[in-house]
Image (cartoon, rainbow, N blue to C red):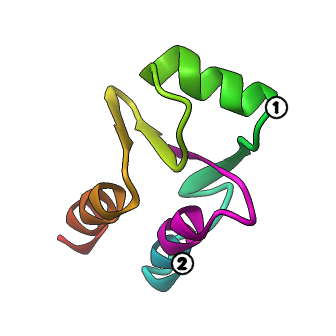
Amino acid sequence: MIKLFQYDSCPYCARVTSKLQSLGLKQDVDYKLIEASRGTPGREEVLKLGGMNQVPFLVDDSVQMYESADIIDYIENKFEN
């Protein structure tokens, strides 16, 4: 299952979650949203896993990536093909 570290007021995170929804993917079935606003355990995990204090951050098995456009490209390639 894809993990997306994000927070609600982040416009870049919203772009990614919108893409997930537009592809018909279901939260907690196909992907999991992890709260990662500043000071949360999710943000600490982002820093530990990826080395940067930035969201959105996607984890899918061994794939880890920042940057909403890159994440959207990855999601489209994974689920549209």
Q: Which residue is tagged 1? A: 40
Q: Which residue is tagged 2? A: 18
Q: State the residue at coordinates (54%, 57%).
A: 30
Q: Residue 68: image x %, image y %?
A: 40, 60
Between 12 and 45, the one lying in front of the other is 12
Residue 1 in view here: no
Q: Find out whether residue 3 is within the magenta segment.
A: yes
Q: Point out the stretch of residues depicted in magenta.
A: 1-17
Instruction: Inspect the image, locate mark 2, and give the three-letter code of the amino acid beneath it.
Output: Ser
Using a 10 Å C-alpha cutoff, classify the residue at mark 1 as few (fewer than 14 neighbours), some (14 to 19) or many (20 or more): few
Label 2 and label 1: CA atoms lie apart by 23 Å
Q: Residue furthest bottom?
A: 22
Secondary structure found at label 1: loop
Between 39 and 32, the one lying in front of the other is 39
Count up the numbered dots: 2
Q: State the residue at coordinates (31%, 64%).
A: 69
